[in-house]
Image (tube, grey):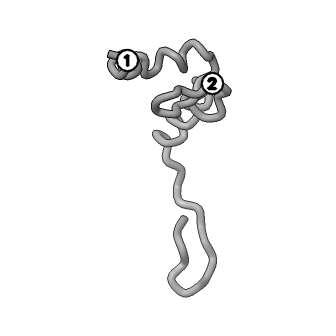
Protein backbone atom coordinates (compact mmCIF):
# COMPACT_ATOMS: atom_id res chain seq x y z
CA UNK A 1 0.00 0.00 0.00
CA UNK A 2 1.16 3.50 -0.69
CA UNK A 3 -0.04 6.73 0.84
CA UNK A 4 -0.67 9.92 -1.05
CA UNK A 5 1.75 12.62 0.05
CA UNK A 6 -0.87 15.22 0.94
CA UNK A 7 -3.71 13.00 2.04
CA UNK A 8 -4.60 10.07 4.19
CA UNK A 9 -5.80 7.88 1.33
CA UNK A 10 -4.09 4.54 0.82
CA UNK A 11 -3.72 3.27 -2.71
CA UNK A 12 -3.00 -0.33 -3.62
CA UNK A 13 0.42 -0.96 -5.14
CA UNK A 14 0.66 -2.55 -8.55
CA UNK A 15 0.16 -6.32 -8.35
CA UNK A 16 3.24 -8.47 -7.93
CA UNK A 17 2.86 -11.41 -10.32
CA UNK A 18 5.52 -13.55 -8.62
CA UNK A 19 3.93 -13.12 -5.20
CA UNK A 20 0.46 -13.93 -6.52
CA UNK A 21 1.80 -17.03 -8.32
CA UNK A 22 3.61 -18.32 -5.23
CA UNK A 23 0.59 -17.62 -3.04
CA UNK A 24 -1.74 -19.58 -5.34
CA UNK A 25 0.78 -22.44 -5.47
CA UNK A 26 1.09 -22.57 -1.67
CA UNK A 27 -2.69 -22.66 -1.24
CA UNK A 28 -3.03 -25.40 -3.88
CA UNK A 29 -0.34 -27.50 -2.19
CA UNK A 30 -1.96 -27.06 1.22
CA UNK A 31 0.92 -25.12 2.78
CA UNK A 32 -1.61 -22.41 3.58
CA UNK A 33 -4.78 -23.72 5.14
CA UNK A 34 -3.78 -27.39 5.06
CA UNK A 35 -5.23 -29.66 7.74
CA UNK A 36 -2.08 -31.66 8.57
CA UNK A 37 0.88 -29.99 10.29
CA UNK A 38 4.53 -31.06 10.53
CA UNK A 39 5.52 -31.75 14.15
CA UNK A 40 8.93 -30.09 13.75
CA UNK A 41 8.59 -26.97 11.60
CA UNK A 42 4.82 -26.45 11.60
CA UNK A 43 4.42 -26.35 7.81
CA UNK A 44 0.93 -27.37 6.76
CA UNK A 45 -0.03 -30.01 4.20
CA UNK A 46 -3.25 -31.43 2.79
CA UNK A 47 -2.01 -35.02 3.18
CA UNK A 48 -1.01 -36.18 6.70
CA UNK A 49 1.65 -38.49 5.20
CA UNK A 50 3.40 -35.49 3.65
CA UNK A 51 3.38 -33.75 7.03
CA UNK A 52 5.03 -36.77 8.67
CA UNK A 53 7.68 -36.97 5.93
CA UNK A 54 8.44 -33.23 6.02
CA UNK A 55 11.12 -33.24 8.75
CA UNK A 56 11.49 -37.00 9.21
CA UNK A 57 15.30 -36.77 9.01
CA UNK A 58 15.34 -34.26 11.86
CA UNK A 59 13.16 -36.54 13.97
CA UNK A 60 15.32 -39.59 13.18
CA UNK A 61 18.47 -37.70 14.16
CA UNK A 62 16.99 -36.60 17.48
CA UNK A 63 16.07 -40.21 18.32
CA UNK A 64 19.70 -41.39 18.03
Residue furthest to the top in view is: 49
Mark seen at residue 63: 1
Toward the viewer: 59 or 23?
59
**Position of 12 relative to 28 (above/below):** below
Q: Residue at x 52, y 33 (%)?
A: 42
In the image, is 3 to the left or to the right of 63? Answer: right
Q: Are marks 2 and 1 in contact (CB under 8 Å)?
A: no
Task: Specify the label residue 16 is tagged with.
Answer: none
| Residue 36 numbered tag | 2
Q: Considering only order in the chain, which callout, 1 or 2, is on the residue closer to the N terminus?
A: 2
Residue at 59% from the left image edge and 24% from the top image edge: 45
Determine the CA span between mark 2 and mark 1: 22 Å
Q: Position of residue 26 (x, y in %)?
A: 55, 31
Q: Secondary structure at mark 1?
A: helix
Q: Are there few (<14), some (14-19), or many (20+) residues within 10 Å of tag 2?
A: some
Q: Nearer the viewer, mark 2 or mark 1?
A: 1
Question: Which residue is pictured at 42% across the width and 22% down the height?
Answer: 55
Amino acid sequence: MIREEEGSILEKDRPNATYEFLLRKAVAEGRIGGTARCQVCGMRYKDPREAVQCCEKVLQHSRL
